[in-house]
Image (cartoon, helix red, strand yellow):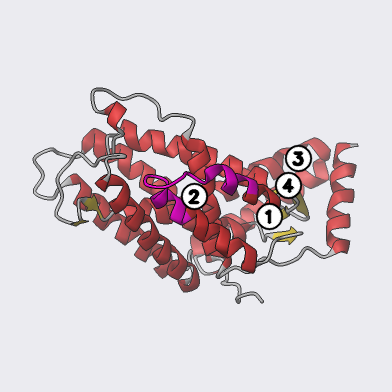
Amino acid sequence: MTTGRMPSAARTWPFLAGFVAAERRLGERARAAGRFPAFAYEFLRFGMKQGWACLFGGLICALLIGTHLFYPADAPLTRYDFLTLAAILIQVALLALGMESWEEAKVIALYHVVGTAMEIFKTGIGSWIYPEASWLRIMGVPLFTGFMYASIGSYIARVWRLFDFRFTRHPPLVFTLPLAGAIYVNFFSQHSMADLRAGLFIATGVLFGGTIVHFKVWHVHRRMPLLLGFVLVAGFIWLAENIGTASRVWLYPNQAAGWSPVSAAKLGSWLLLMIVSYVLVTLVNRPEAMPREEAAAGAAEAVASRA
């Protein structure tokens, strides 16, 4: 079962429609010029699609850096409250411009709630702190923090649509949903009970170890192990976390006296959180199987391009 696909914003926004037309002509010239120009164009197209998928998260990161460098300390509106209002405006704009569907927004809103609940718990036990004052907060947690979590869900939903994801050997929701639930519960229970992360990593490997994601950059679907995709995205989230702490939006206890990079051990936590985000998005974008003939055609073209 799949949901209806929303039309791309490029089809309804004149500026983007003109850009897409020009980009298509560039692609045709690159393909006619030979293998290397075609490869370079596809690589460029991949980066542009990824950047477009990261739009919400990228804007949030830009706000974190910009407000750290330039936001007036004596402004009547606190920095955290400004971040909250700016994030709301970005979300409204994405919906109004057709860059995000209401179905995706519902999942992102759910992830906002899920993330905020975890923030309340984690800050309550001192895992990290928000050192600045604000009015728009719940139990010491500024409301914009939920948008930082929601940006992960936004990225997954957008990249899914932009790259037209298809899958081979994707586990069913009846298995992935309990895994996501167990991961989320463990973020709370590990402080008072046994930490089950090792078992959760094993369960993730068992469920997703054989899953291949097929993504369409240009004319054909390329393929990659889904677990590798999870690891790569977790790495980028870790980099974003370093941006957040360097801009003093939140701080870990060891960063109170001076900034230091976030421990690489956090990559494991972000990987597990990625699974939660991904499973929530699959509630809207149900994974579609990759037809064998299309997978074979994509593999054949990939081999031909390397020959």
Which label lies toward us, 4 or 1? 1
Residue occupied by mark 2: 273
CA–CA distance between discs 1 and 2? 16 Å
Q: Secondary structure at mark 2?
A: helix
Q: Residue at x 76, y 38 (%)?
A: 37
For the record, the magenta segment spans 184-202
Q: Is residue 185 magenta?
A: yes
**Sequence-earlier tag: 4 or 3:** 3
Q: Nearer the viewer, residue 163 or 25?
A: 163
Q: Quadrant of residue 259?
A: top left
Q: Amino acid at mark 3?
A: Phe
Other-residue count near label 3 (Cα within 10 Å), few / some / many at <14 / 14–19 / ≥20: some
Q: Residue at x 70, y 51 (%)?
A: 206
Q: Position of residue 301 (x, y in %)?
A: 86, 49
Which label lies toward us, 1 or 2? 1
Answer whether labels 2 and 4 touch (C-beta < 8 Å): no
Answer whether labels 3 and 1 touch (C-beta < 8 Å): no
Other-residue count near label 4 (Cα within 10 Å), few / some / many at <14 / 14–19 / ≥20: few
Residue occupied by mark 4: 224
Q: Position of residue 260 (x, y in %)?
A: 35, 24
Q: Secondary structure at mark 1?
A: helix
Res 118 seen here: yes
Q: Nearer the viewer, residue 202 or 244?
A: 202
